[in-house]
C-alpha cells in the first residue's frame, strides 16, 4: 500500500508540474470567479499554506489572468525554440547540407586575410590553425552537441582559408614597380592581343633593361604598342624576342574607395608594371640561343595556334563585328571587340556571353554529348549493349578539355571546366551530376589553389548563378516544371504537343530571372550598375546563343581540317550580329542602370541571404529572408559622395543633383577639366549614380573668393578651382590648387587640396583651420571620396566634410611599392636633363 501511495504522489506531482496554470493561490479563483481555471477532476490543488506570499514592501506581483498566461507562454517558448533549433540542425546534418558550407568558410577566411591590415604573419596563421585543430578534436571528443562541433569546424576552415591565401601570396611574390620611369627593355613575348583601335598589347617577361638599368625591375610587364616592326614577318610571335623603349608605370590602385583594385589583380597575375612603347616595338626573332622548357614550348605553340585560329575565323583585315565576337567565343581573346559593343552587352545584361565560362562550357560539351549519344543510338546493337551515355560524357569531357586549352585557360574558364568535369565524371559513375555537393567541391578546389579569386566578380557571379539555379531546379518548382505535360492520358492533346515548348520557355524565363537576381548583387557591388531589362535581353538572346551560335562554333571548329569552315563561321557571325543588335536595342529602351555604391555591410547581408536560401534545407532558410530588410535599409541609409579625387590628384569632380533636358532630376558630375580622363569618368559616374558629366565654369584668371560660386557648383581658373557644396542642410567649401600655393583660403575654406608635389600644408593645425590634402596624401592612401558629415549634436559645428580613402595606411604586398613613387615622397615629376 505504501508503495502504491508513493506512485500516486509521484503521478500527482507530475501532473501538477505539467499544469502550471493550476498551481495558483485559492484566493485568486475567488477574486476573479473563474471557475473554468479550476483544475479538472482528479488533479489536486496546492494548499494555500504551501504557497509563498509576497514580501511586505516588495512590488506587487502581476496576479492577473493575462499576466499569468504571458509568463506561462514565455516559460514554454524557450523549450519550443530549443526543440525547433535542434530539429533544424538535425535536418541539415541528415541532408548533408553542412558540406556545401565548406567553401563558404574557406572563402570567408581568404577574404579576412585579403582585407586585413597590416599583413598577417604566416607563423601566426600556422599557430592558429594548429590550436584550432586541437580544440576541434577536443570538442568532437568531449561534446555531443552538434552546434559546438559545427562552430569549431567553421573556425578551423576560416583559418585554413586565410593560411591558403597567405601561402599563395608568398609563393607568387610579384616584384612591383615603385615609380614611373622610361627605359629600354628586352624580353620574351608571352601573349599578343590585337586591339580594336589598331594597337597591339604585349605581355612580356623581361630579361634585361638599360638606359637606365632598373635595379628592381619587374619580372613581367604589360605594354601597348602603336607600331610594331617585324610582326608582319612573324605574325604568331609568342615566345619570340622583343625590344624597344617603354614608359612603365606601377599598376593602378582603385579609382575610388571599394573599387576594382588593378594592382591586386596584376600582383596575382605576376604583372609588375604597365605602360606603352615610346616609338616602335621591334620583334627580333625566335629564341634560338636559349633552351626552352617543354612547358614553355607547349604554351607558346598553343598560343600561336589560337592566333592562327582567330585569323581563320575572322577571315580578313576588316572583319565584321559578328566574326570578331565569334573569334572571341572560340579563342577567348576579347581584345579586338569594339568598345561600343562591349558597353552595349554589359549594360544590357549580356556580357556573360563574352566570358568563356559555365554557359559556353556547358553548350560545347552538351553539343558533343548530344551528338555522340544520338549517333550511337542509331545503331540498336550498340545502344542496347554499351553505355552510350557514358561514352558521350567521356567525349564531352575531352571536348571541354580541348576548349579549355584552345581558349587560353583563363581563371573563369578553368573554374567552369573544373565544375563541368566533376559533373561529367559523376555521370560516368552513375551519380547525380548537378548537385550542390559537386558545386561545393569545385569551389573548394579553386579556393585552395587560387584563393585570391574569391575577391573577383567572375568567381562570385559564376558560383552565385550556378548555386541559385541548382537550388531552384532541385526544388518542388523545378520538379513541377520539368514534369509539366508528362501525363498524356489526363490532359488534352494540344497540351501534350505544346508541353516541350512550354517547358523550354519556362526554363528559359526561370534561368534568366534566377541568374539575373543572383548576380545583380555582385554587379551592383563591383560595377555599381544593374541591367533593368536584362531579363528581356536574355530571354531573346540566350536561345540564339544556345541553339545556334555555340553549336555553329563547334561545327566550324570540326570543319577546320576540311577547309569548309568559312560559311559556318559566317553564319555564326550573322547570328552574333543579331545578338549585338538586341543588346543595343535593350540599352536604348532601358532606364539608367547606375545604382551608386553598395556599402560593404549591405553587400554582406545580401550575400548571406543568397547563401542561406541556396544552401539551407530546413526551416532555417526562412530566417534568411528576414535579413533582406536590414540589407536594404543599410543601403538606403548610405549617403552619396559629394566630391571625388583621383589618386594622382589631377582629376577632381563635384557630384551634384541637376535637371535633365526632359525636366527630370538626375545626378551629374562637374569636373575641374574640360576633357577629363575617359576611364576615370567611366568609373566615377556609376559610383555616384550619375548619368552625365560636364566641366566647371572656366575663367581667364583664378577666382579669389566664394562670392560668385553658387551652391553645388564649381568655378575654375588656370590654377585654382572653388567648389561650393550644399547637401543635407550643411554647407562646405572646397579649394583645389594646382601648381600654386595660396594660404588666403585658410579662413574661408573647409577643405583645401594641394594637387601638386612638393607641397606643404600652410593653414596650421588649429581646429578652425581648413583641412588640407596634398598629392602626397593621395599617392600614399589612394583616391578619395568626400562626404558631408553629420553635424555633431551638442557641440559647435566642425568641418562638414568626411574623407574616405581607397587604400589603408598599412602596406600589403600588391601596393607596398607605392611608397617609392615620387609623389609619395613629395617630389616633383622627374624630367630628363637638357643636353
Image: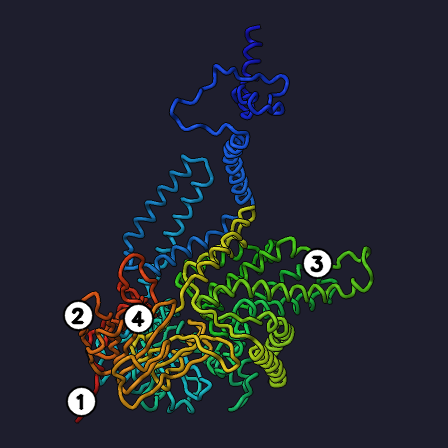
Question: Which tag, 1 or 3, sits closer to the chain's start?
Answer: 3
Mark 2: give few (<14), some (14-19) or many (20+) Cα within 10 Å: few
Q: What residue does disc 3 label?
A: 385
- Disc 1 and disc 4: Cα gap in Å? 30 Å
- Could you say where residue 816 lies in the image, as x and y percent from the top left? 27, 68
Q: Which mark is residue 397?
A: none
- Could you say where residue 510 lies in the image, as x and y percent from the top left? 62, 63
Q: What residue does disc 1 label?
A: 833
- Disc 1 and disc 3: Cα gap in Å? 83 Å
- Could you say where residue 193 lies in the image, as x and y percent from the top left? 43, 82
Residue 548 higher or lower than 496, as above or below: below
Question: Which tag, 2 or 1, sits closer to the chain's start?
Answer: 2
From this viewpoint, is residue 440 visible? Answer: no
Foreground disc of the pair 2, 1: 2
Identify the element where label 2 is drawn: loop
- Disc 2 and disc 3: Cα gap in Å? 89 Å
Q: What residue does disc 4 label?
A: 782
Q: What residue does disc 2 label?
A: 764
Task: Give whichever of 542, 396 is nearer the camera.
Answer: 542
Q: Given contact means CB atoms under 8 Å apart, are the residues at marks 2 and 1 in contact?
A: no
Residue drawn 54% across the image and 11% down it: 6
**Horizontal side, residue 665 vs residue 424: left or right:** left
**Horizontal side, residue 799 vs residue 630: left or right:** left
Using the rendered view, name the quadrant where residue 466 is placed.
bottom right
Residue 13 higher or lower than 207, as above or below: above
Mark 3: give few (<14), some (14-19) or many (20+) Cα within 10 Å: few
Amino acid at each position: 500500500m505504501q508503495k502504491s501511495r508513493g506512485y500516486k504522489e509521484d503521478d500527482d506531482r507530475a501532473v501538477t508540474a505539467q499544469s502550471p496554470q493550476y498551481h495558483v493561490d485559492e484566493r485568486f479563483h475567488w477574486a476573479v470567479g473563474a471557475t473554468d481555471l479550476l483544475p479538472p477532476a482528479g488533479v489536486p490543488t496546492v494548499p494555500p499554506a504551501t504557497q509563498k506570499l509576497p514580501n511586505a514592501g516588495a512590488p506587487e506581483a502581476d496576479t492577473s489572468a493575462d499576466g499569468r498566461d504571458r509568463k506561462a507562454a514565455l516559460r514554454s517558448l524557450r523549450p519550443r525554440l530549443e526543440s525547433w533549433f535542434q530539429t533544424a540542425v538535425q535536418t541539415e546534418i541528415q541532408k548533408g547540407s553542412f558540406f556545401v558550407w565548406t567553401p563558404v568558410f574557406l572563402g570567408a577566411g581568404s577574404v579576412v586575410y585579403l582585407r586585413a591590415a597590416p599583413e598577417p604573419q604566416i607563423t601566426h596563421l600556422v599557430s592558429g590553425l594548429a590550436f584550432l585543430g586541437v580544440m576541434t578534436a577536443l570538442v568532437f571528443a568531449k561534446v555531443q552537441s552538434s552546434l559546438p562541433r559545427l562552430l569549431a569546424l567553421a573556425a578551423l576552415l576560416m583559418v585554413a582559408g586565410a593560411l591558403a591565401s597567405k601561402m599563395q601570396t608568398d609563393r607568387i611574390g610579384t616584384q612591383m614597380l615603385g615609380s614611373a620611369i622610361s627605359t629600354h627593355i628586352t624580353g620574351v613575348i608571352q601573349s599578343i592581343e590585337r586591339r580594336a583601335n589598331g594597337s597591339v598589347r604585349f605581355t612580356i617577361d623581361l630579361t634585361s633593361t638599360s638606359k637606365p638599368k632598373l635595379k628592381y625591375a619587374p619580372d613581367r610587364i604589360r605594354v601597348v604598342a602603336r607600331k610594331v616592326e617585324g610582326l608582319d614577318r612573324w605574325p604568331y610571335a609568342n615566345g619570340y624576342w622583343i625590344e624597344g623603349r617603354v614608359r612603365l608605370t606601377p599598376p593602378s590602385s582603385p579609382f575610388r574607395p571599394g573599387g576594382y583594385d588593378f594592382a591586386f589583380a596584376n600582383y596575382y597575375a605576376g604583372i609588375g608594371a604597365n605602360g606603352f612603347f615610346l616609338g616602335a616595338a621591334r620583334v627580333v626573332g625566335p629564341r634560338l640561343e636559349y633552351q626552352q622548357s617543354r612547358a614553355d614550348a607547349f604554351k607558346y605553340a598553343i598560343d600561336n595556334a589560337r592566333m592562327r585560329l582567330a585569323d581563320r575565323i575572322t577571315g580578313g583585315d576588316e572583319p565584321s563585328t559578328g566574326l570578331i565576337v565569334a573569334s572571341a567565343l572560340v579563342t577567348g581573346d576579347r581584345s579586338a571587340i569594339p568598345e561600343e559593343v562591349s558597353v552595349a552587352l554589359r549594360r544590357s545584361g549580356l556580357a556573360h556571353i563574352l566570358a568563356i565560362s559555365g554557359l559556353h562550357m556547358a553548350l560545347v560539351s552538351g553539343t558533343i554529348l548530344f551528338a555522340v549519344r544520338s549517333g550511337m543510338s542509331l545503331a540498336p546493337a550498340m545502344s542496347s549493349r554499351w553505355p552510350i551515355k557514358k561514352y558521350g560524357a567521356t567525349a564531352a569531357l575531352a571536348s571541354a578539355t580541348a576548349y579549355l586549352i584552345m581558349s587560353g585557360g583563363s581563371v573563369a574558364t578553368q573554374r567552369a571546366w573544373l565544375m563541368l568535369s566533376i559533373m561529367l565524371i559523376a555521370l560516368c559513375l552513375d551519380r547525380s551530376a548537378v548537385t550542390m555537393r559537386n558545386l561545393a567541391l569545385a569551389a573548394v578546389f579553386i579556393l585552395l589553389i587560387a584563393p585570391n579569386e574569391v575577391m573577383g566578380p567572375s568567381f562570385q557571379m559564376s558560383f552565385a548563378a550556378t548555386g541559385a539555379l541548382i537550388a531552384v531546379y532541385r526544388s518542388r518548382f523545378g520538379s513541377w516544371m520539368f514534369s509539366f505535360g508528362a501525363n498524356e492520358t489526363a490532359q488534352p492533346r494540344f497540351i501534350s504537343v505544346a508541353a516541350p515548348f512550354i517547358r523550354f520557355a519556362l526554363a528559359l524565363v526561370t534561368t534568366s530571372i534566377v541568374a539575373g537576381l543572383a548576380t545583380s548583387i555582385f554587379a551592383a557591388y563591383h560595377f555599381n550598375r544593374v541591367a533593368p531589362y536584362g531579363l528581356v535581353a536574355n530571354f531573346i538572346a540566350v536561345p540564339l546563343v544556345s541553339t545556334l551560335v555555340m553549336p555553329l562554333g563547334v561545327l566550324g571548329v570540326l570543319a577546320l581540317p576540311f577547309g569548309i569552315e568559312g560559311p559556318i563561321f559566317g553564319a555564326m557571325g550573322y547570328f552574333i550580329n543579331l545578338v549585338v543588335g538586341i543588346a543595343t536595342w535593350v540599352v536604348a529602351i532601358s532606364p539608367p542602370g547606375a545604382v551608386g555604391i553598395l556599402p560593404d555591410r549591405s553587400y554582406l547581408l545580401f550575400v548571406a541571404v543568397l547563401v542561406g536560401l541556396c544552401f539551407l534545407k530546413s526551416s532555417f532558410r526562412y530566417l534568411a529572408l528576414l535579413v533582406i530588410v536590414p540589407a536594404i535599409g543599410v543601403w538606403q541609409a548610405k549617403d552619396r559622395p559629394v566630391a571625388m579625387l583621383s589618386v594622382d590628384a589631377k582629376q577632381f569632380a563635384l557630384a551634384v543633383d541637376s535637371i535633365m533636358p526632359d525636366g527630370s532630376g538626375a545626378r551629374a558630375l562637374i569636373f575641374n577639366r574640360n576633357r577629363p580622363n575617359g576611364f576615370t569618368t567611366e568609373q566615377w559616374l556609376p559610383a555616384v549614380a550619375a548619368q552625365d558629366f560636364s566641366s566647371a565654369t572656366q575663367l581667364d584668371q583664378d577666382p579669389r573668393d566664394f562670392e560668385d560660386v553658387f551652391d553645388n557648383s564649381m568655378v575654375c581658373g588656370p590654377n585654382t578651382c572653388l567648389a561650393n557644396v550644399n547637401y543635407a542642410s550643411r554647407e562646405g567649401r572646397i579649394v583645389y590648387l594646382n601648381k600654386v600655393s595660396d594660404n588666403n583660403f585658410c579662413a574661408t575654406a573647409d577643405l583645401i587640396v594641394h594637387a601638386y608635389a612638393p607641397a606643404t600644408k600652410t593653414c596650421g593645425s588649429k581646429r578652425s583651420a581648413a583641412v588640407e590634402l596634398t598629392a602626397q596624401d593621395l599617392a600614399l592612401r589612394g583616391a578619395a571620396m568626400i562626404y558631408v558629415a553629420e553635424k555633431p549634436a551638442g557641440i559647435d559645428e566642425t568641418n562638414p566634410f568626411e574623407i574616405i580613402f581607397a587604400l589603408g595606411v598599412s602596406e600589403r604586398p600588391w601596393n607596398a611599392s607605392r611608397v617609392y613613387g615620387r609623389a609619395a615622397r613629395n617630389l616633383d615629376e622627374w624630367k630628363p636633363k637638357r643636353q
